[in-house]
């Protein structure tokens, strides 16, 4: 039976909270690299196992509430798949691909399962006081999570972030303002989620390497897309006037070129923004970045995810078809015109038809690449 790689997050240090929120909020199919100190957060035994793991192996991410009443509390975050690991200079870097957020049947049942199954294997647990950082392994290999704890289907993101908003280190307070937000990209015509590179296509080196090809969004040059920002803003429960701006920054090959602006001004809401890949861009990589702030002076200690989605522009089958058609029209027009040049007589049919066919090919090219003729 295949073991599951268990990764634990706690956000204990303020500097790590954004990384923890990124792991909670990043879209399904995207990836993130986690770094751990060897022999502090991860053992030699697990490091050796990582070197033998193959891409696609199961991963489960759990958040550890250090300050829960009665000891550590364990909150399920999401499924994932292993991509690669690198042991370098006392640091272990683990790259995973994110999966779904499970829908829990009963939160207390998962907590009990973790205490009974993962803590005996060395998972983080209370050692004298919550601030003790020598509290166990934050990466371990063990049994898969009992599937009976989860509903068979559903998107559990909203429930996950609502539970995490009650955790001490992610709780909104007088000194800290926390925003939970996810960023998804949809195809406008089908209203379906845009596809990421499958793990099988990444060609990950068998030997540990500093370079790991991470999944990218595969967006077609001839299609329109919609960026959807879903957020949860706990401060709105106490202050309905609270508002924090955010921006979606598009790289040079995406249209419109200017940043797309929005604001967090409700407890929970989704906002959508249309964009597309510039038809004539020669760039092989684009990106969308979601950033929050600056917060108003009265909102202290803004903590929010900072998400960047890499994009690999694809040429659609329809676009390839029209490129071939244009090429054939141009060749045919050139051939007819050349033949007409060798023909004598008062009316040379090809003399007029050849350039006309080429002209039609140029007009078709302008249309599919979105070039306007003025």
Image: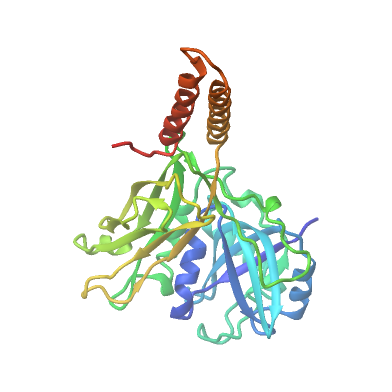
For residue 49, say whether it is visible: yes
Q: Nearer the viewer, residue 176 or 200?
A: 200
Q: Nearer the viewer, residue 323 or 167?
A: 323
Quarter holding the N terminus is: bottom right
Would you place residue 87 above or below residue 275 in this image?
A: below
169 relative to 112 in the view: left or right: left
| Residue 33 picture quarter | bottom right
| Residue 8 picture quarter | bottom right
Would you place residue 211 above or below residue 154 in this image?
A: below
339 relative to 174 in the view: left or right: right
Q: Position of residue 218 (x, y in %)?
A: 55, 48
Residue at the image position 42 percent from the left and 47 percent from the top:
278
Q: Position of residue 339 (x, y in %)?
A: 58, 22
| Residue 340 picture quarter | top right
For residue 105, say whether it is visible: no
Q: Nearer the viewer, residue 104 or 51?
A: 51
Q: Nearer the viewer, residue 171 or 336?
A: 336
């Amino acid at each position: 039976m295949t073991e599951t790689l268990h990764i634990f997050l706690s956000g204990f240090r303020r500097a790590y909270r954004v990384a923890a929120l990124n792991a909670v909020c990043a879209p399904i199919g995207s990836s993130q690299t986690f770094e751990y100190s060897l022999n502090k957060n991860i053992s030699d035994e697990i490091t050796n196992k990582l070197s033998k793991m193959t891409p696609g192996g199961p991963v489960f991410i759990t958040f550890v509430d250090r300050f829960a009443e009665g000891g550590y509390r364990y909150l399920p975050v999401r499924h994932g798949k292993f991509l690669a690991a690198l042991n370098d200079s006392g640091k272990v870097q683990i790259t995973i691909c994110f999966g779904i957020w499970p829908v829990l049947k009963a939160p207390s049942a998962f907590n009990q399962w973790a205490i009974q199954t993962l803590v005996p294997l060395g998972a983080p647990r209370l050692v004298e006081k919550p601030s003790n950082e020598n509290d166990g392994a934050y990466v371990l290999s063990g049994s898969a999570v009992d599937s009976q704890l989860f509903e068979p289907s559903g998107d559990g993101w909203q429930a996950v972030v609502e539970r995490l908003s009650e955790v001490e280190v992610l709780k909104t307070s007088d000194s800290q303002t926390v925003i939970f937000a996810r960023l998804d990209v949809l195809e406008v015509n089908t209203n379906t989620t845009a596809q990421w590179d499958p793990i099988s296509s990444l060609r990950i080196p068998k030997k540990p390497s500093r370079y790991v090809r991470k999944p990218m969004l595969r967006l077609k040059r001839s299609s329109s897309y919609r960026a959807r920002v879903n957020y949860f803003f706990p401060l709105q429960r106490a202050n309905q006037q609270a508002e924090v701006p955010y921006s979606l920054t598009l790289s040079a090959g995406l249209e419109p070129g200017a940043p797309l602006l929005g604001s967090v001004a409700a407890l929970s809401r989704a906002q959508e923004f249309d964009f597309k890949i510039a038809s004539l861009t020669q760039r092989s990589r684009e990106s969308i970045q979601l950033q929050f702030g600056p917060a108003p002076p009265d909102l202290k200690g803004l903590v929010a995810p900072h998400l960047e989605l890499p994009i690999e522009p694809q040429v659609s089958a329809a676009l390839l078809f029209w490129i071939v058609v244009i090429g054939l029209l141009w060749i045919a027009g050139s051939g007819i015109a050349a033949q007409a040049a060798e023909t004598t007589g008062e009316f040379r049919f090809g003399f007029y038809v050849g350039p006309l066919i080429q002209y039609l090919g140029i007009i078709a090219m302008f249309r599919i690449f979105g070039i306007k003729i003025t």
